[in-house]
Image: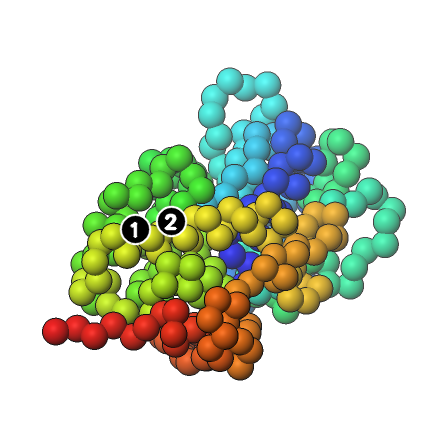
Amino acid sequence: MPELPEVESVRRGVDEWTAGTTITGAEVADPRILGTTSQRRIDPSAVSGFVSAVTGAHILRTERRGKFMWLSLREQAGLSAGPELGILLHLGMSGQLRIHSPGEEVHRHTRAVLNLDSGRELRFVDQRIFGHIGVQPLVHGYGRLVPASAVHIAADPLESAFDPEMVVGELARKRTAIKSALLDQTLISGIGNIYADEALYRAGVHPLAVPVRTRKSRLVAVLESATKVMSDALAVGGTSFDALYVNVNGESGYFDRALLVYGRGGQECVRCGTEIAKTTVGGRGTHYCPNCQRFPRYR
């Protein structure tokens, strides 16, 4: 699944093309894209309801929290009121948002299209239909307006609402493996499997270390490493392992070339030469260096 850097790369591209435009119409080619992975049986009225809700709405900007992205809307252009609704755009495992001109070839996995008064189309392409799109009210959550379904999602390290001291304090009370804690989107959002492994390696912390029994200075180092590695990834468009993750122009990210442990099981550690190990933590494949990330000995 795309993580914070990948979603932010897409957000920037979508915002560049859509901010300040008005939605003149919408098409839903596959109603399943209006559901979620756990609810794909869609009421027939959902399509007309979605089209009616978005047509004529003015896009203020494209926003993101963690892996969640949305278009903030006003019901009409020219009004001075703030955003009222949002179009949630969750990419899931294989979702893509692509900008096209009308008349350009439509990809066979295109599930929904927003027509813009700029003469462009924002197309939601999703091969496996793990993503979804839908209109939701914006509500207050962790210091800002977010779509209702994301109200439980914590702030991420790249937004102003993020409070690192508070997060470290909450992390320090966790009794689960630190790798699992980093993936808890109610604690800190945006970090997925790739960047959790990379952050722990850079901080020299074993993925099975227990936060409540780990020095706070080391927890701070993990959080700082996560912020740094995601910022570095964002600078080169994120991480692409296949053609499923691309930005709005169809371009891939290049951070896979800079990964130090993730996906390198069996290869030599770039620091010490020890073979990178792979294990499972919380059901997720996890890569680490047994020498640089020593298993902690608790007394």
Residue at (46, 77) in percent of width and height = 274
Asked if the residues shown at circle 2 and circle 1 are in contact, with their CB atoms under 8 angstroms apart, the answer is: yes
Q: Nearer the viewer, residue 120 or 195?
A: 195
Badge 1 element: helix
Q: Is residue 274 left or right of residue 162?
A: right
Q: Hey, which residue is sitting farthest left in the picture?
A: 299
Q: Residue at x 57, y 33 (%)?
A: 61
Amino acid type of the residue tagged 1 in the rendering: Val
Using the image as rendered, state which of residue 172 and residue 136 is in the foreground: 172
Q: How many marks?
A: 2
Q: Which residue is mark 2?
A: 224
- Please identify the quadrant where the C terminus is shown: bottom left
In this picture, residue 83 sits left or right of residue 169: right
* Image quadrant assignment for residue 16: top right
User: Element at badge 2?
Assistant: helix
Check the picture and name the quadrant holding the N terminus.
bottom right
Relative to 126, residue 62 above or below: above
Q: Which residue is mark 1?
A: 220
- Rendered residue at 21%/58% (across/down): 215
Q: Position of residue 47 (x, y in %)?
A: 61, 53
**Image quarter for residue 60?**
top right
On the image, which quarter does residue 44 sit in? bottom right
Near-viewer residue (242 or 100): 242
Q: Position of residue 211 (x, y in %)?
A: 24, 63
Q: Quick one: 100 or 77, which is closer to the camera?
A: 100
Query: Measured from the top left, where is residue 6 in percent x and y?
Result: 58, 53
For the residues labelled 2 and 1, the Cα–Cα distance comes to 6 Å
